[in-house]
Amino acid sequence: MLGFTKFQLGKSNDMSRLRAMSPRRSYDQYCSAARALDVVGDRWTLLIVRELLAGPRRYTDLHADLPGVSTDVLASRLKDMERDGLTTRRRLPPPGAAYVYELTGRGRELLPVLQALGEWGEGELGERRPTDALRAHWFALPLLRGLTDEAAVSAGAGLVEVRLDEGEFHLHVGAEGGPVYGDGPAPAEPDARLVLDAGTCTAVAQGRSTVPQEVRAGRIEVTGDGAIAKALRNA
């Protein structure tokens, strides 16, 4: 191994790991929908994309926020997604020194796909079952859709902090690149703060109501001086 730099060795190990991945299964149909499903049609793949839309995540964090997935299946899906150019894997600098997974530009292009799928599935949500897991940030994409309604879209891009009893998360409304949401409080002073309960989030996620309607009904409390907060209060 004399003469190899650490970078070269790391690159060589990554290439060996990628070569060891199983070949992609295919529908073998000359159709763009079939080709797309070759890449994202496996169970868990799009839910992993949902989690990575929040930015780089460690394997342990992904596993914690994807209840029901086995460690073997998660590892396999992550390798497949890396092979197919949807994600990359990199090591954080010290003192972190952990590996994280993040979406590539190609992977981030799945945001409108997930949004369309979520909108299509609104009627399937129904009542929460006793066996249903819930994470506060799973409401991020439905609320992001709601905040691009006509009442808020004129306000442009901005940072929105959302607080539920189940936890806090933040949204990057109108983001052109990078994360579209994140777990926990906003990393900077937000343009708007929203306080609501899971029932109100569910109504928006089911398509039974909209964010402006819930604001007018007093079920979403809006604070802040940013353009988005003002647009919502005036909707």
Image (tube, helix red, strand yellow):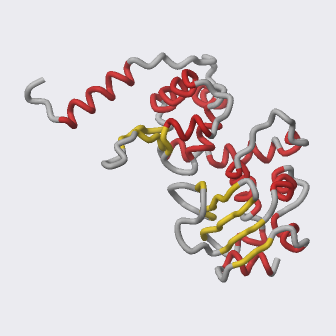
Residue 127's place in the image compared with 22, above or below, is below
The answer to which quarter of the image holds residue 121 is top right
Q: Residue at x 80, y 36 (%)?
A: 132
Residue at position x 81%, y 43% in the image: 120
Residue at 89% across / 59% down in the picture? 209
Left or right side of 67 for 97: left
Residue 72 place in picture, x, y as percent: 55, 21
Q: Is residue 113 above or below residue 183?
A: above
Q: Position of residue 149 (x, y in %)?
A: 77, 65
Q: Quadrant of residue 153?
A: bottom right
Residue 133 x %, y %: 75, 38
Observer-nearest of 136 and 82: 136
Residue found farthest to the left: 2
Which quadrant, please, contains the N terminus? top left
Q: Can residue 52 be seen in the rendering of this structure?
A: yes
Q: Quadrant of residue 46?
A: top right
User: In front here: 111 or 192?
Assistant: 192
Q: Say which quadrant the C terminus sits in.
A: bottom right
**Measured along the vertical axis of the image, is residue 212 above or below residue 167?**
below
Total count of labels: 0
Q: Along the horizontal axis of the image, is 164 left or right of 187?
A: right
Where residue 19 sits in the image (x, y, percent)?
A: 37, 20
The answer to whether residue 103 of the structure is visible from this angle is: no
Establish if 57 lies above or below 223. Answer: above
**Residue at the location (78% across, 69% down)?**
150
